[in-house]
Amino acid sequence: QNGNPGHCSHYNSDSTPLVALPSAIYANGAHCGKKVIIHRGSKSVEAVVADSCPTCVSSHSLDLSVAAFKALGTEQEGMFDITWSWA
């Protein structure tokens, strides 16, 4: 975020919906550039895989860019339950 490159080696903007996958799913970059759809209740956002998330505790945990996060909730919420699938 903030223009820093993720593990996929692309410079990322906070205004672009991006996602970091748990390391086991990220699979050393095998999914870089693929799209996922993230759902929270009636809201959803499509995001591009841009990084790995070594601190994500399960396959249901994702790390979202500011843009992806704001499409689903507020930054003040910090964390919330989601579901996701490949686009």
Image (tube, grey):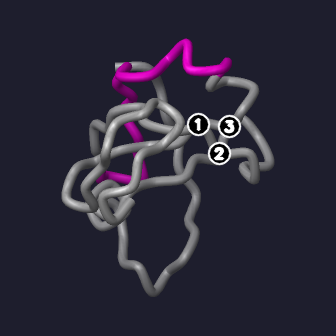
Judging from the image, what secondary structure is the residue with disc 3 in?
Answer: strand
Q: Which residue does the image show at 65% across and 47% down from the upper left? A: 61
The region drawn magenta spans: 27-43
Q: Secondary structure at mark 2?
A: strand
For marks 2 and 3, the one nearer the N-term is 3
- Report whether 22 appears left or right of 66: right
Q: Quadrant of the N terminus?
A: bottom left
Looking at numbered disc 3 in the image, what kind of residue is underneath it? Pro
Residue under the image location 53 percent in, 36 percent down: 7
Asked if marks 1 and 3 touch (Cβ < 8 Å), the reply is: yes
40 to 27, vertically: above or below: below
Query: In the rendered image, which quarter contains the C terminus?
Result: top left
Report the side of 53 relative to 7 (left or right): right
Question: What distance separates the C-alpha of mark 1 from that of mark 3?
Answer: 4 Å
**Residue 9 percent across, percent down from the top left:** 42, 33
Left-right relation of 29 to 71 = right
Residue linked to disc 2: 53
- Crowd tier of the residue under label 2, counting other residues whose Cα lies within 10 Å: few below 14, some 14–19, many 20 or above: many
